[in-house]
């Protein structure tokens, strides 16, 4: 009897213990998993190290490139102001701008020729920091096919862009007419000065020769008192 009671008691305890272990289990609803619930908005999320939009990267130009760009802009502006004809533009060298252009029959063949003066935008400097050979003067004439060509060049006739003293740029004028041209400079401060170089075409030598140099100067305190000297070709011979 005692053994039967103990066996019955053990069976009841075992049943209660099993019921306690399974009572907390619940079936998962159909169609759902046991992963954490997340919401989807149908948008692609890029990882931190990759973006669809490209960064706004600005091109960095070197000082030389910036200088070259500035020179090109100056040259184009000067050409536009002088209204350079298309046939003359090929003679405007890289790194220069046109500062004077005049036309006439320079060699007596009844065709239109040109005097072109260029200015180097980054010229060499002398010991006093003045530009050297900054402004080449070029003579453009036509051949028998009416095509222009550069036949003469001189880099010393036209003074530099800052050689006029207080007047800064001394180039006053380039005057042309049939078989001749003149380059006129003017500058100074208290003492004003001017110089004119005149060239004539020689049919014998087939070139333009310096035939006259006229120098004038006066004081701004007495403008009526002008000193003048004129040199002719006999004073300096053929050039």
Image (tube, rainbow, N blue to C red):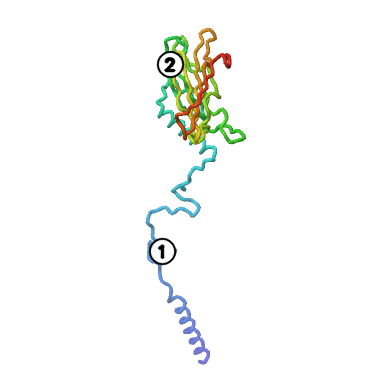
Mark 1 vs mark 2, foreground winner is: 2
The residue most toward the top is: 204
Residue 177, label in figure: 2
- Image-quadrant location for residue 82: top left
Question: In the image, is residue 166 above or below residue 24?
Answer: above
Q: Are marks 1 and 2 in contact (CB under 8 Å)?
A: no
Residue 75 x/y as whole percent? 46, 31
Left or right of 133 in this view: 84: left
Please, which residue is most extreme toward the right here?
A: 127
SS of the residue under disc 1: loop
Q: Disc 2 on helix, strand or loop?
A: strand
Among numbered discs 1 and 2, the one appearing first in the sequence: 1
Position of the C terminus by quadrant: top right
Of residues 138 and 224, which is closer to you in this image? 224
Real-space CA distance between mark 1 and mark 2, rounded to the nearest whole angstrom: 95 Å
- Where is residue 120? Give x, y as percent: 52, 30
- Tell me residue 201's x, y (percent): 50, 12
The residue lying at 47 percent from left, 78 percent from top is 18
Q: Find residue 37 and name its label.
A: 1
Asked whether 109 or 191 is in front, the reply is 191
The structure residue drawn at horizontal position 51% and vertical position 89%, both measured from the top left corner, is 6
Q: Residues within 10 Å of mark 2 (few under 14, many from 20)?
A: few
Mark 1 neighbour density, 10 Å: few (under 14) some (14–19) many (20 or more): few
């Amino acid at each position: 009897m005692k053994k039967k009671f103990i066996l019955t008691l053990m069976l009841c305890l075992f049943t209660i213990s099993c019921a306690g272990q399974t009572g907390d289990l619940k079936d998962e609803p159909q169609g759902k998993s046991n992963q954490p619930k997340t919401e989807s908005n149908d948008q692609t999320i890029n990882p931190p190290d990759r973006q669809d939009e490209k960064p706004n990267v600005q091109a960095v130009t070197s000082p030389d490139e910036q200088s070259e760009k500035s020179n090109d802009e100056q040259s184009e502006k000067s050409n536009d102001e002088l209204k350079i004809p298309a046939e003359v533009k090929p003679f405007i060298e890289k790194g220069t701008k046109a500062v004077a252009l005049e036309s006439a029959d320079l060699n007596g063949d009844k065709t239109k020729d040109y005097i072109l003066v260029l200015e180097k935008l980054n010229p060499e400097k002398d010991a006093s920091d003045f530009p050297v050979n900054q402004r080449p003067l070029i003579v453009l004439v036509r051949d028998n096919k009416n095509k222009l060509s550069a036949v003469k060049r001189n880099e010393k006739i036209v003074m530099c862009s800052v050689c006029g003293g207080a007047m800064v740029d001394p180039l006053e004028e380039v005057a042309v007419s049939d078989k001749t041209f003149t380059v006129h400079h003017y500058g100074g401060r208290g003492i004003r000065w001017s110089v004119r170089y005149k060239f004539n075409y020689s049919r014998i030598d087939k070139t333009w020769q310096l035939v006259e140099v006229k120098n004038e100067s006066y004081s701004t305190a007495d403008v009526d008192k002008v000193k003048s000297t004129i040199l002719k070709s006999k004073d300096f011979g053929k050039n």
